[in-house]
Amino acid sequence: MAIASSAPTGLLSAQTASSQPPKATAGEPEKSFIIGLEDVLSINVWREAELSQKEVVVRPDGRIGVPLAGDIQASGLTTEQLQEKIAEKLKEFMASPVVTVSVIKIVSSSVSVVGQVMKPGVYPLGAPMTVLELLARAGGVTLDAKSKKIKVLRKEGEKIVQFEFNYNDAVNGKNLQKNILLKSGDVVTVP
């Protein structure tokens, strides 16, 4: 059974009150994806097949190896920034290199669900995902779950912020503003 969600899909602004869900900001530009450790990238250098790489894993030190360019810091950069960095290094060997970097597998961005769900664990956050969508990926809540007392824990700076989520309300189309978009590192606890 598909459940329609009217939860906002924009970026969330930081909230400090523990009972209020973060709100989407209308008209806020979408941030580019930031490459992280263990993400898998594809690097294409136009008309230079021997320099192109189908799968490059970002190493634990945050770097990748690129033919001719050597080791380059990738973690913490957007794909556009990494493209520019690689192209700049390749200019020593060729005129006007055209480099395209694509993220083919996101490993660095993930959320966790623990407690009374069918499949607790860590789930990749490759696209925007709400609490209800994560619970669906985890096989749903168990019969023993206290589904009115689900919490989302989020680290903001040095502080842990907590958001409440009522599964029963969400599946019945109520209080959908609490079906927030998750951020990397969030932990959903189902008592």
Image (cartoon, helix red, strand yellow):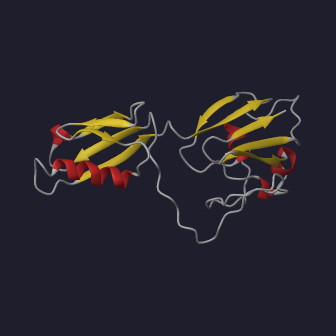
120 above or below 12? above
Q: Image quadrant for the N terminus?
A: top right
Residue at the spot x=84%, y=57% of the render?
175
Residue at the spot x=33%, y=35% of the render?
56
6 above or below 137? below
Residue at the spot x=50%, y=36% of the render?
107
The location of residue 128, given as percent across then percent down, is 59, 51
Which residue is at the far left?
Answer: 94
Q: Image quadrant for the C terminus?
A: top right
Residue at the spot x=35%, y=54% of the render?
81
Which residue is at the far front?
Answer: 158
Which residue is at the far bottom?
Answer: 27
27 above or below 34? below
Between 1 and 83, which is closer to the camera in this rendering? 83
The location of residue 66, given as percent across then percent down, is 24, 38
Between 150 and 5, which is closer to the camera in this rendering? 150
The location of residue 153, given as percent across then percent down, is 74, 42
The location of residue 16, given as percent across then percent down, is 76, 56
Please state if 111 lies on the left or on the right of 92 as rendered. Answer: right
Please state if 127 lies on the left or on the right of 104 as rendered. Answer: right
Between 20 and 177, which is closer to the camera in this rendering? 20
Q: How many marks?
A: 0
